[in-house]
Image (cartoon, rainbow, N blue to C red):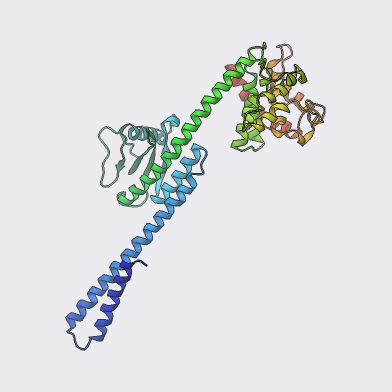
């Protein structure tokens, strides 16, 4: 209890005790005045305590939100957590984090509402309030199903990166000043994380495009190989998703599959003479691993490239590893690689349909290929057929 509370409590107790002691001496109106003052003091103190409890509760909620937020590694997580905690501050029918770079283009009325309102707030960079005390701006057409609205820009240091939309407040009355202040804090904290994740994503896209350009240069040296590595990467991720890989594992798998044939790039002089002499000119998996030998943080990718030609029964290269001794990503890439070879790399007269390729892959289950990954390929057959159609339409 702080000094102010202690003093106030002491005054109230003193007034009550004094009134009791002097009950036979003081006139009734004086006692009534003392009782009134004591009552006002108790009420004031109770109000302070209630406000303090409410303030502490609000700060705990914001602290909890911040702890959850800093752990987010995906933009969708930031949106979901921001919406969840905003709804705890103000209960509304709809709570949405709008971002123009992923705005819905659907025909649903509510989706269109999000788009138009979100873009208006982004353009004007101002808080929009529509309730019992605030009407909508003249230049904004608000759908009739929206009775109340609070829209707060999610501003980063550089730009507006989204809008927090609170539609149709469930409780009666206007949005309070404290509710707006807390939601602005939610938006401000979310903006920092969104800005950081968007910047990170843009860097990843840039790096990925550079890698794809390198891969295209490698594949351009061999007739018919154009697009092979990207297709193997896509198929591998389809299998990885079915096998339950998390986001980090999927990223490693995608890069491993995309670069699985990097060893076909001939860079004379990049490997020392002793290493060059020890390598079979056709051992592109070994060469690929050696190209990445001094790159930090890519050990999983390097191993996946090195071992993607191992066989499940131990008859593969370069080390004759078998079963689970072969890295999991390498086992996934092996299935994707063979599948794409049969459906796309073969000459037209030898090329197999997706269904025929699947049957051929199943024949190698347990000998050449990991049975678990082969089952995953069978389970994504429908998705694979749709993906194949998209590839052919490109």
Residue 90: % across, % down: 38, 50
**Closest to the observer, 78 or 210:** 210
Q: In this image, 143 relative to 314: left or right?
A: left
Placement of 153 over or under 38, stated as above or below: above
Farthest residue in the front direction? 273
Q: Quadrant of residue 279?
A: top right
In the image, residue 364 above or below residue 71: above
Kindly identify the residue that appears in the image at 29 percent across and 69 percent down. Answer: 43
Whole-percent x, y for residue 286 in the image = 73, 23
Q: Residue at x 61, y 38 (%)?
A: 246
Q: Residue at x 48, y 35 (%)?
A: 197
Considering only vertical position in the picture, is 223 above or below 30? above
In screen coordinates, is 227 left or right of 54?
Answer: right
- Viewport quadrant of the C terminus: top right
Image location (x, y in percent) of residue 319: 79, 28
Q: How many marks?
A: 0
Q: Nearer the viewer, residue 108 or 176?
A: 176
Quadrant for residue 345, please give it.
top right
């Amino acid at each position: 209890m702080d000094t102010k509370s202690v003093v106030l409590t002491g005054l109230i107790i003193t007034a009550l005790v004094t009134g009791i002691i002097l009950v036979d001496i003081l006139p009734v109106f004086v006692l009534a005045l003392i009782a009134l003052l004591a009552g006002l003091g108790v009420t004031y103190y109770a109000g302070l305590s209630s406000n303090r409890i409410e303030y502490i509760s609000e700060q705990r909620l914001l602290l909890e939100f911040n702890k959850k937020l800093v752990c987010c590694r995906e933009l969708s997580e930031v949106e979901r957590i921001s919406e969840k905690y905003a709804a705890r501050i103000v209960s509304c029918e709809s709570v949405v984090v709008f971002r123009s770079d992923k705005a819905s283009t659907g025909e649903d009325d509510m989706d269109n509402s999000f788009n138009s309102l979100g873009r208006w707030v982004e353009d004007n960079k101002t808080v929009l309030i529509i309730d019992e005390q605030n009407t909508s701006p003249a230049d904004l057409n608000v759908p009739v199903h929206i009775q109340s609205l609070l829209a707060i820009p999610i501003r980063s240091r550089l730009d507006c990166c989204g809008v927090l939309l609170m539609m149709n407040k469930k409780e009666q009355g206007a949005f309070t000043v404290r509710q707006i202040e807390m939601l602005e804090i939610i938006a401000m904290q979310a903006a920092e994380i969104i800005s950081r994740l968007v910047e990170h994503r843009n860097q990843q896209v840039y790096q990925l495009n550079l890698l794809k350009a390198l891969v295209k240069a490698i594949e351009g040296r061999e007739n018919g190989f154009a697009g092979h590595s990207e297709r193997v990467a896509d198929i591998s991720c389809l299998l990885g998703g079915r096998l339950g890989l998390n986001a980090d594992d999927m990223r490693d798998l995608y890069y491993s599959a995309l670069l699985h044939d990097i060893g076909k790039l001939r860079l004379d002089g990049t490997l020392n003479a002793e290493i060059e002499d020890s390598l079979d000119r056709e051992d592109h998996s070994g060469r690929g691993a050696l190209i990445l030998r001094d790159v930090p943080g890519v050990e999983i990718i390097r191993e996946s490239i090195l071992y993607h030609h191992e066989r499940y029964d131990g008859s593969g290269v370069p080390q004759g590893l078998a079963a689970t001794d072969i890295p999991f990503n390498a086992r996934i890439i092996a299935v994707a690689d063979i599948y794409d070879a049969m459906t796309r790399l073969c000459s037209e007269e030898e090329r197999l349909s997706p269904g025929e390729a699947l049957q051929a892959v199943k024949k190698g289950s347990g000998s050449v290929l990991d049975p678990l990954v082969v089952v995953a390929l069978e389970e994504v057959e429908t998705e694979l057929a749709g993906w194949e159609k998209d590839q052919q339409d490109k």
